[in-house]
Image: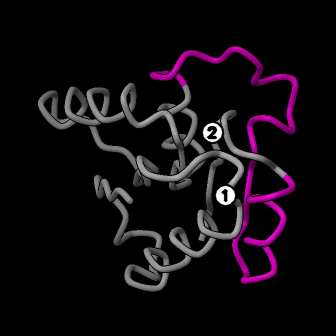
Amino acid sequence: MRLLLDANLSPRGIGAPLPTAGHDVLALAANPAFEGLDDPLVLELASAEQRVLITRNSRDFAPIAREWAEASRHHTGLILIWTLDHSQFAAIVTGVERYLQRWPEQEQWRDLVVAF
């Protein structure tokens, strides 16, 4: 699965374990070119790169996803993390993996928004 980790998620603590399960991960925090990218542009980047966006910034991205749906704009999937602190690496990776196993094909994620 192609994934994009928002800047609020650790490239090492979360980004490093996911490729061992076969996922292609791009972490915004590991790339200075993406520093300070506005949230709507992050979702646009994820869509342009054909990546499922994973973020703890659920309060901002839930309304953006709703706006996109109302405007019939498509994205490539969104995993919103509401309940875990950014330092709970293992729990976040486990939660992400659970959803990726439930929907294992990239095209199944089109316009899908899940949360934990």
- Which residue is at a point 62% across and 58% down the rendered structure image? 3
Please state if 24 lies on the left or on the right of 72 as rendered.
Answer: right
Q: In the rendered structure, which amino acid carries the disc numbered 2?
A: Asp
Of circles 2 and 1, the one toward us is 1
Q: In the rendered structure, which amino acid carries the disc numbered 1?
A: Gln
Q: Position of residue 71 (x, y in %)?
A: 16, 27
- Which residue is at a point 37% across and 45% down the rendered structure image? 75
The image quarter in which residue 74 lies: top left
Quadrant the N terminus occupies: bottom right
Residue 107 position (above or below residue 21): above
Give yes or no for residue 18 being in the magenta stretch.
yes
What residue is pinned by disc 1?
A: 88
Residue situated in front as seen by the camera: 37 or 45: 37
- Which residue is at a point 75% across and 24% down the rendered structure image? 34
What residue is pinned by disc 2?
A: 6
Mark 2 to mark 1 CA distance (whole Å): 15 Å
Q: Position of residue 52 (x, y in %)?
A: 51, 55
Residue 74 position (above or below residue 1): above
Quadrant the C terminus occupies: bottom left
Q: Which mark is residue 31?
A: none
Residue situated in front as seen by the camera: 76 or 103: 103
Which portion, as a residue range, is magenta?
Answer: 12-41
Residue situated in front as seen by the camera: 79 or 89: 89
Mark 1, residues whose alpha carbon is within 10 Å: few (<14), some, or many (≥20)?
A: few
